[in-house]
Amino acid sequence: MTTPSLLILPGDGIGPEVMAEVRRIIDWFGARRGLTFDITEDLVGGAAYDAHGVPLADATMARAQQADAVLLGAVGGPQYDTLDFSLKPERGLLRLRKEMDLFANLRPAQCFDALADFSSLKRDVVAGLDIMIVRELTSGVYFGQPRGIVEEGGQRVGINTQRYTEAEIDRVARAAFELARKRNGKVCSMEKANVMESGILWRDVVQAVHDADYPDIDLSHMYADAGGMQLCRWPKQFDVILTDNLFGDLLSDVAAMLTGSLGMLPSASLGAPMENGRPKAMYEPVHGSAPDIAGQGKANPCACVLSFAMALRYSFDQGAEASRLEKAVEKVLAEGVRTVDLMQSEGESPTSTQGMGDAILAAL
Amino acid sequence: MTTPSLLILPGDGIGPEVMAEVRRIIDWFGARRGLTFDITEDLVGGAAYDAHGVPLADATMARAQQADAVLLGAVGGPQYDTLDFSLKPERGLLRLRKEMDLFANLRPAQCFDALADFSSLKRDVVAGLDIMIVRELTSGVYFGQPRGIVEEGGQRVGINTQRYTEAEIDRVARAAFELARKRNGKVCSMEKANVMESGILWRDVVQAVHDADYPDIDLSHMYADAGGMQLCRWPKQFDVILTDNLFGDLLSDVAAMLTGSLGMLPSASLGAPMENGRPKAMYEPVHGSAPDIAGQGKANPCACVLSFAMALRYSFDQGAEASRLEKAVEKVLAEGVRTVDLMQSEGESPTSTQGMGDAILAAL
Ligand SMILES: CC(C)[C@H](C(=O)O)[C@@H](O)C(=O)O
Ligand SMILES: CC(C)[C@H](C(=O)O)[C@@H](O)C(=O)O
């Protein structure tokens, strides 16, 4: 078997520094567990724009298509705010998602025991929380045509199109049902079928896939606004939440915030299987590029480390090694190691990005 | 001056029973404060469908157009779930919003002191919370064309269109800035300008209206997903939140849930001034029709009562009388009067819908 390839795109802001810690952890898995990867590093987002004038070079896109998995840090920064829409750092990320056809975005919202007090929600509402949001990532209003700002009767009109085909809904629904089978067997699908026809089709197709091939799963449907409410009220009622690209963007951010520790949350974006059987895949932390603290060694590398753990599980079939890494992170938290974002009072002294990396390596 | 007219649409589920309490309160204002209204009652939602085969009869629509204010209870129920999209109870509500052109939906998210412990959020995060969401209500993806489910290449495709004109953004932005002037002078506008061109136009127009006519207001912009996060993390950072129809639907529900007492929250939907200077207006509680408890005298009438208070303030220029009513509700809560939805432990004995009405009347 050939060595699996990993394309690393550190990106902007705190991306490079958190990714540096992940590199050390990847090295550890190579030296100690015999898991080696053929690693290439490249640019995305503002970093790519600075070097090539575009947020993702064609050569990088080609490399991503070939890679067994892509690991991305974060994109964006205030210096790129005035760029044209088509050149903004985000477009690099969106191009990767679209061209690799990464239709299933897995966003676990998990509350770490040691951090339950961090949440703005009451401890009993979030302690032990473990839900998985499956967000459709390659269609909907993010990519639908027509779109743009046009002139009409002397004024500008902003237009975007929400568009979902049956096949697009079908495949992401299957991804959610498959995941639920390995979890607690429950899927709640969210849309606005009371207002949007695309939501009616969504509900219809999800129900049909369920009835045909996943009758064992406990499927429910909820309007997305009520879903947002219920996430805030009693998130533990959910197991897997299935939703579209735009609702998923909002609801997964709300769910992430519930856990109280955004700096801890990874994500996986999966596509169809490649020839070698592995899914096309990109892994990235849920947090952004945090330009305000970039380059100061303050960033929490855990979300990026846990994104690599998801890569071990979903791309490389190394579930046991993934758990090993996840347990190491939990242990470090339980021991009280804290980056700045995880501190509750001024009195504590925070550890650095590298210090957190050291601690995770020691725990491994 | 002629007696102002009020069209009352109790609707479905708990709508009629909460509205019955409001009627008693309106009577009190007539008898004790000399505020009389020319009241007509009519049907909306499932109740209208049952009587006329449509969720809003043309005659009712015409009455709403003539009324100085409309007071609506709630619409919907499981028996209407299988109706065609165009006949569902919600369409009655959406038709009223659209044809009356009620573009500014005001949704206060206020945490009542006596109820702060009800929230799933920690007390210090929500106690004293008082924010106002201004949601655009007559455009966006709710009404944009083209829409529907079409056949394409042998499969169904669901389509909706997000569409905003400059004028539509301009007028709702002004409504938000005007409100902020009477509050704490801050507006945070939310969209997804990093992904949607309609969001770029939204941000652009809001900023231009600000710079031209409201430079005294502290305006900020936030992506809607980050907005959802921030609402959960530290909602008190906001004063007025300005957003579009779909984001407003989600974000206002999240904000409402933060307060921990959905049964308490009113809303106002305002349009352009009529000939008599009053804005076209409809007032309704944020909660739904709650079919599971309908007809049992368990419903909390406060949200509907407070919606009438908003009518006093925004339609009838009776700010002092509105405050009188709001204070009466607060007093009743402080005294510990609780409908079922406001009870924290099994031990307490709840008051009925009518009991709550009695208590408010006594406090007045
Ligand atoms: C950065 C942005 C384009 C992106 C999105 O809207 O999808 C982000 O918010 C996310 O959730 O990954
Ligand atoms: C009932 C439904 C059509 C409505 C909406 O989506 O606007 C409701 O959720 C609301 O927020 O008033």
Image (cartoon, coloured by chain):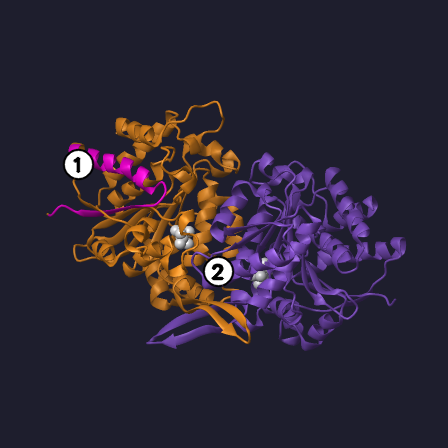
Chain colours: A orange, B purple
- The picture quadrant where one finds residue B329 is top right
Q: In this view, does B354 lie to the left or right of B174?
A: right
Q: Does the magenta stretch include residue B177?
A: no
Image location of residue A257, percent across then percent down? 47, 42
Q: In the image, is the residue at mark 1 within 8 Å of ligand 1 by its beta carbon?
A: no
Instruction: Write down the chain letter for disc 1.
Output: A
Q: Circle 1 sits in a helix, a strand or a loop, which is it?
A: helix
- The picture quadrant where one finds residue A15 is top left
Q: Magenta segment range?
A: A2-31
**A211 lies above or below B236:** below
What amino acid type is highlighted by mark number 2?
Ile
| Residue B169, label in figure | none
Q: Name the residue under label 2.
A: B200
**Crowdedness of circle 1 by 10 Å Cα count: few (<14), some, many (20+)?**
few
Q: Is residue B88 left or right of residue B146?
A: right
In-front residue for pair B183/A202: B183
Q: Does the magenta stretch include residue A26?
A: yes
Q: Mark 1 points at which residue?
A: A30
